[in-house]
Image: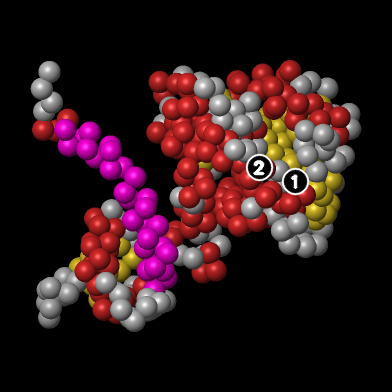
Amino acid sequence: MAMGAGEFEQAVENIYSFVPTLVLKSAILLNIPDIIANAGPNASLTLAQIAEKLPTKTPNLHSLSRILKYLSFRGIFVQTQTGQNPSDPRYSLTDSAKMFYVRENNPASLVPLLLMLTHPVLMAPWQHLHESVLQDCNAFEKAHGKDLWTYEKEDPTVNDVFNNSMSTITILLMGKILSGYDGFKEVKTLVDVGGGKGTALAHIVKAYPHIHGINFDLPHVVQTAPSVPGIENVGGSMFDSIPSADAIFFKNVLTDWDDESCIKILQNCHKALPKSGRLILAEIMTAEDSNSYKSIEIVFDLVMIALANGGKERSIHELMKLLQLSNFNVVKIVELPGLSKLKIIEAIKV
């Protein structure tokens, strides 16, 4: 069957779908969103004005103009012509560009996430995705000879890139979680399992200063966590044991692991909690019917195949089953404002 022109163009577009992310990365590494933003509110700069702020005396203006033209087409910048010199367009920021300021200028910047996902170490496993099917192996381990967590332990640079990214996502999510869920108000001691640099706990303790927070993660992770009043950083493995508290919090942790590993983690939570102790899960949850999945759900799930140890995105009922097998009763499911997929499951130890 002959391929129509539209089908051919769609096929080629799919092949080149990696281009937008990597061109955006180049603009971020050139610091272009911040260059325009630093020029003042509603600034509009010419190519030459942007170029003179780059860390080189001899920028390739032709390449720069093509990058800016493409990202204007993608809606990151706005390209406008001026009457005085129509051959020299000016560039300003769209609202979406503001998410790509460097983190110092915007704590909720998405730059750390983009730099993490496009880091050469985390891009390499995608070259082995087919082998995860043929050989039933972990794609990250196939690429690097060890799993992601071991690699991070041995490479502080990758560890920082990963944890900075997770902190950024946490900043973006915690406002929604705290505005949509009030279950922390009765908690006295709270463990955040897989808490990274303690970003989530810092938000929780700020909102509920009576809470004593325990930020629990691997030793090499908590070594990089800042000292925050009301928070104790504890290193260890959730597969061995979890610090005791009257409530335990997870945010997008179970998604990294297969069912057997999740049950082991949840059983350790059960041991760490007192009678009727609470488990609070903030997890991305997929639609029950795979035919109803949104594209972002499918993307997240493939990221788990590429990077995680048997991890996957789960539906509410799949998570509830894991909790029931670990002797927890689900008592509440909370929808969060502005987040269609991230939900809170509150469960009680039985």
Label 1 SS:
loop
Where does label 1 land, which residue? 218
Q: Label 2 sits on what residue type?
A: Trp
Label 2 SS:
helix
Q: Residues within 10 Å of mark 1 (few under 14, many from 20)?
A: some
Magenta highlight on residue 26:
yes
Task: Tell me what residue is drawn at x 68 percent, y 35 percent.
Answer: 281
Task: Tell me what residue is drawn at x 40 percent, y 20 percent.
Answer: 291
Q: Residues within 10 Å of mark 2 (few under 14, many from 20)?
A: some
Where does label 2 land, which residue? 149
Task: Tell me what residue is drawn at x 54 percent, y 34 percent.
Answer: 142
Check the image and report above or below for 53 versus 156.
below
Residue 339 in the image: x percent, y percent?
Answer: 51, 41
- Residue 57, visible in the rendered structure: yes
Given contact means CB atoms under 8 Å apart, are the residues at marks 2 and 1 in contact?
Answer: yes
Check the image and report above or below for 283 versus 114.
above
Q: Label 1 sits on what residue type?
A: Leu
Query: What segment carries the magenta color?
Result: 8-35
What is the quadrant of residue 48 in the picture? bottom left
Image quarter of the N terminus: top left
What is the quadrant of residue 239 in the picture? top right
Horizontal side, residue 13 vs residue 26: left or right: left
What is the quadrant of residue 348 in the picture? top right
Residue 96 in the image: x percent, y percent?
Answer: 38, 57
Image quarter of the C terminus: top right
Horizontal side, residue 274 vs residue 266: left or right: right
